[in-house]
Image: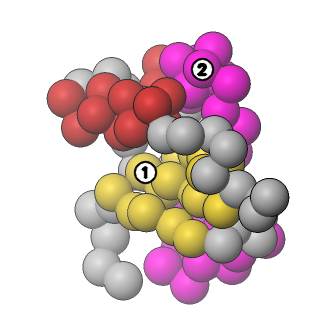
Amino acid sequence: MKKPVRTLFLTHAADLGGAERSLLEIMERVDRSRVAPSLCSLSQGPLLDAARGAGVPVHALPAPESVTGLKRGALGLSPDAALKSLRLAA
């Protein structure tokens, strides 16, 4: 059996608005035998607690000085794939 794809979900916001609720629902509903979700946020907030409650590993990074700083921080987590929801140019 193949290992689950380590998928990192990146977000700038950790509130529980519509976009964040959708992101949480995706992470909750993915087939964990195929996808191993984790969440990386640039801020603290209720989304992180909700994700932890759903069994999703959470990583909070301080807001980077640049996108390069974010890439370095996120790549240290070694995901196989990443989905971003950021208000930063990449």
Q: Which residue is mark 2?
A: 54
Picture quarter containing residue 86? bottom left
Q: Residue furthest front?
A: 1
The residue at 52%/67% (across/down) is 82
| Residue nearest the observer in this picture, 47 or 42 | 47
In the shown orientation, is residue 86 left or right of residue 11?
left
The residue at 28%/62% (across/down) is 87
Q: What span is colored magenta in the figure?
A: 48-77
| Residue nearest the observer in this picture, 78 or 48 | 78
In the shown orientation, is residue 28 left or right of residue 55?
left
Which circle marks residue 36 in the picture?
none
Q: Amino acid at mark 2?
A: Ala
Please identify, in this view, whether the residue under mark 2 or under mark 1 is nearer the observer: 2
The residue at 62%/52% (across/down) is 34
Q: Give yes or no for residue 66 being in the magenta stretch.
A: yes
**Picture layout, residue 23 above or below residue 48:** below
In the shown orientation, is residue 83 left or right of residue 73?
left
Figure colour scheme: secondary structure
Task: Describe the element under mark 1 as helix, strand or loop.
Answer: strand
| Residue nearest the observer in this picture, 7 or 44 | 7
Q: Is residue 41 visible?
A: yes
Q: Which residue is mark 1?
A: 11
